Amino acid sequence: MITSAAVKVQPINRTWEGIALVGIIILALLLALVNLPYAPRTWFDEGSHLHVPKTLVQRGVYADISSEGFRYYGPTVGVGPTVMLPIALVFQLFGVGLLQGRLVIAAYGLLAFAVGFALARKIHGGRVALLSLALSLASRTVGFDGMVEYSRQVLGEIPGLAFLFLGALAWISALHSRDRVTVLSSLAGLGFGLALVTKNQFVLILPPTLVLLALLDWRYYRAGNWAHRLLPVIIACACFGLWTLVQLQFLGPGGFAANLAQTRQAAGGAIFVFDREASLRAVRYIIQPYGGLLLPALAYGLWRCRARTPQALSELLLLLLPILWLCWYLVSLGWPRYAFPAVAFGALAVARLLADMIGTLRTGRRPILAWAVVAYAALIIALPITLSAQAILQADDSAQRMAAYLDAHVPTTSIVETWEPELGVLTDHRYHYPPISLLDTAVRQTWLSGPALRYDGLSDRPQFVVVGSFGAWVGIYAGEILERDYTLTQHEGLYNLYVRRP
């Protein structure tokens, strides 16, 4: 068993530490910015999120939009104003575009990268911080995205992660402070609260984690005071509660009760599923990150936290979050993206495990085994980064090509039926999208073999229909009707444009 008493990570030479840090920063910048508009190819969730800042800038309304009017739920509920408003500001200054929106998320990604490094350095020192920084770039698996990919898409995970890191850094600083506990604890609550506002799924994990930490500190660690135990959770929940009230009262045309029902429906049925196949998918995913070391690293980290010290309590914060997150993930729909924040936090635990393993083996005069661990660490970092780099270099501009074709050949006054909301960001056509209420049914049908998806959008005889990756995936448009009544006039990658026959 590795013991913290037996392992003392020596500080590395500051010059080499600086060189390594600069190298990782340059790599992170390249991975964040190269081919940003085209890799990964834009898709359903990203497009729906970008509708809100575009509608706000062009029409002055904080809402999604379809040809029949505004839609106040869906993307307005799933991702908060901490994402929508900065993108709207960039749209106002530099015009509406996918690149502009993605640059905001890339900036959030670099912020999360920097604060994550500061957090790791504060807790574990320079060597572990550098290792965790490299591991965060390598958080993808062979088949699923990681921090690099999520930092290049307009989603809520990366901004939420940045605020979580900021909150955690302030929380740990407050724990070790003597004269600024109240201020730092309040800042921790604000950081955590902004994370809850950014991505509402975080509310399932973060408040219970903070409450559990307060109880453990009160009864076991006795490292903090009551301001440190209570202010973060109170302020965080107040932030989320205030934003929820704003949504329910002002972001919809109905009354409070009607808006509440719409909000609950828009959240979908993917949060608590308790489906065997979904749980098996979740298990298959969580054993993969960091070469299979995520779960062992979390277990080892818990073992380190047995000491009744501020250091142990600090480490526990960064362990309880991913552990509780993964427990929820096992009973959710099993989307890998749901587990990403836990995987991102797990990079620090894996770095601590690897550093302690190498240190223990060197102290025990087992250099061959120590070098074997070093080689394995290099492999689990290099392989995912290589996969991310390959994905970035394989740019896909099919959405932009289809948008250019629509601009050239389809009047902007015509209604285009589609379930590819990203096109609504790339062009100014009038798009009609299926109702938001069908999204949960479509996902359940595809992932859980749920009830058949029924939609009669073609019964209105739209002149133009675009079927892309999402529409084809869920089978929203009847193939026999498209074949009988429409002519395929343009094909761009996964996008097909159909024109109704006379």
Image (spheres, grey):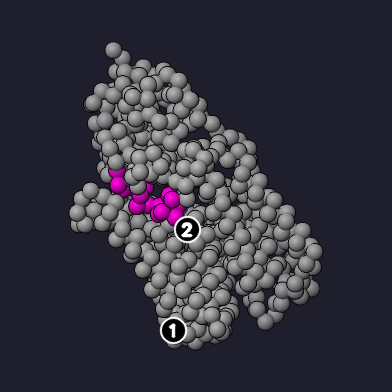
The answer to if 77 sits in the magenta stretch is yes
Q: Which residue is mark 2?
A: 160
**Where is residue 404 shown, x and y percent of the image?**
48, 25
Decide: is 391 above or below 5.
Answer: above
Q: Is residue 13 left or right of residue 88?
A: right
Q: Is residue 171 left or right of residue 204?
A: right
Range of magenta residues: 71-85
Q: Residue at x 48, y 79 (%)?
A: 182
Circle 2 SS class: helix
Decide: is 349 above or below 67.
Answer: below
Judge the density around disc 1: few (<14), some (14-19), many (≥20) Cα neighbours within 10 Å.
few
Q: Which residue is mark 1?
A: 226
Most frequent secondary structure within the magenta stretch: helix
Q: Is residue 264 left or right of residue 336?
A: left
> Label 2 is placed on what type of residue?
Gly
Q: Is residue 105 left or right of residue 434?
A: right
Q: Which mark is residue 143?
A: none
Q: Which residue is at the far top?
A: 502
The answer to if 61 sits in the magenta stretch is no
Judge the density around disc 2: few (<14), some (14-19), many (≥20) Cα neighbours within 10 Å.
many
Q: Residue at x 26, y 50 (%)?
A: 252
Q: Residue at x 33, y 39 (%)?
A: 65
